[in-house]
Image (cartoon, grey):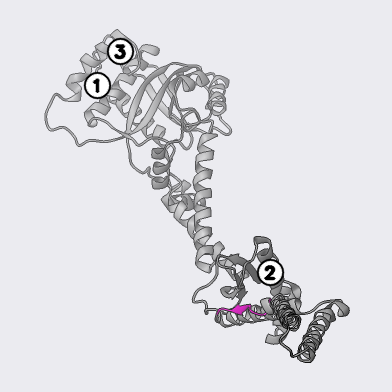
Amino acid sequence: MSDDTIRLVTIGRMIRRRRRVLIILAVLGALVGYGTSLLFPPRYTTSAAVLLPGAWEERELLTQTQIATSSVVIDRAAATLGWSGGGELRDRVSAKAADGNIIKISGTADTPERAQQLSDQVAQQFVAFAARIAGDTTDPEAAARPEELRQLVVRTSRRITELADTADPGSSVESVQTRTELAKLRTTLQEAVNKLDQADPAAVKADMVVMGPAARPDGEAPPTRTQFIVAGALVFFLLAVVGHLTAARMSRRLRTEPEITAALGSALLGTVDVPGERPVRRAERRDTRDRIRRLLGVDVRWDVPAPRTSGDEADRRIRYRRVCARLREQVPASRRLLVVVPDGDEIALRAAGRLVTEAESDSSPGSASGEYPVLRVVAVSVSRPLVPDRDTEAGALVVLSAGSWTAAELAGLAEACADAGHEVVGIVMAGTVRARPPRSAGPSPDEATPALAVRGHATGGPV
């Protein structure tokens, strides 16, 4: 898999074969998310809207949002509500400008009631503070000048009226023109006073209104406890999936026949099939670690393709007999061979046992090549390989399954055989298959063996 592209079928196979450990990790992630949610108490958020009449530019609205969340407004709201910690409330209040010259002030608290109270009070304090800013000035003289101007206009208007009354009541052209000019002057002064009143910023800013009370929130503000739990489960699940794929991608286990034969320095004699079933654990290996692995479902490889469908028992027996026939060609008749199986390779161990059974059956004693070699199986640890010294054996036969061992481990196994005086005469690959039901008709394996043996002598190549 290290050289293959990771496809959806690979991910699906991994999820199917590792579903137990993935479910356990997802539950663990959910518990972690629940524990994290306890560190963040629930929060509730609601908003109050303030209408700003008139024409406002975007920068002016931005200024108003800054005023709404200023420390002055927040502190006054906290003092009115009787809450302590105005500085902490500043992080729970936000304001933004919406369409239609509306400022939305949002408040967040630990209960729906407090969130509603906070939003309403901040909105009211904002309107009051904005009106105060619009009506107040830092220069007392500048603040008094508009009022003095109004009083001056009033006095001038009265003087004009007096002059108009004391003018010549005659009907001469000059008197009529004088009274007309004085009336126009009085009207002009009155219009100026009206415009001055309309231009008063306090009159405009005081029209800010709160558009009703804030709605009481009916749900928590995100992230909620449920979101924490779901996020924790999802994160742990994805990390487990990525971890499995990364480990398989970086795996150095040999999977192809040329790689395995090059690591062991010998030729491939054939490939045999082992019916796919959960291997029976030996009593001495049923320790706590093994039980945990079986409980989690990690005792079965996931990064190997699904077993292919093979023939029936007769077809599988033919493959084993072909291997035995090639072994008879490799060593003289009536000689012994040591069958080396990597410790922990259950598939190879079952295949080696089946080879011993087929060699002992010796179904073709009349063959010109003689009987099958006598096989003796030994399991050798790949971490510290130690092969029994050579006695009467003519060599060693290595039986293993693909995708289980690295090149260094297999090289160490070959070196251990050489140190014990055994020459590796061949390699047998064992693969898992799905067994078919036995055939009800057809020639028996014993009848087919002589023809297959002759074909094996003729070809001399692996199946």
Taking the spot 33% from the left edge, 35% from the top edge, the residue there is 307
Secondary structure of the residue carrying tag 1 is loop
Q: Which mark is residue 363?
A: 1
Q: Earlier in the sequence, mark 1 or mark 3?
A: 1
Q: Position of residue 303 (x, y in %)?
A: 44, 37
Secondary structure of the residue carrying tag 3 is loop
Q: Look at mark 3 in the image and give the residue it sits on.
A: 370
Taking the spot 62% from the left edge, 74% from the top edge, the residue there is 107
Taking the spot 70% from the left edge, 67% from the top edge, the residue there is 66
Q: Look at mark 2 in the image and give the residue it sits on.
A: 64
Q: Position of residue 244 (x, y in %)?
A: 50, 43
Residue located farthest toward the front when viewing the structure as drawn: 172
- Badge 1 density bin: few <14, some 14–19, many ≥20, Cα 10 Å: some
Q: Amino acid at mark 2?
A: Gln
Q: Position of residue 156 (x, y in %)?
A: 81, 84
Extent of the magenta region: 205-211
As drawn, 455 above or below 446: above
Q: Earlier in the sequence, mark 2 or mark 3?
A: 2
In space, the residues marked 1 and 3 are separated at their CA atoms by 11 Å
Q: Nearer the viewer, residue 402 or 49?
A: 49
Residue 330 in sight in this render: yes
Count the numbered circles shown. Answer: 3
- Badge 3 density bin: few <14, some 14–19, many ≥20, Cα 10 Å: some
Q: Amino acid at mark 3?
A: Gly
Secondary structure of the residue carrying tag 2 is helix
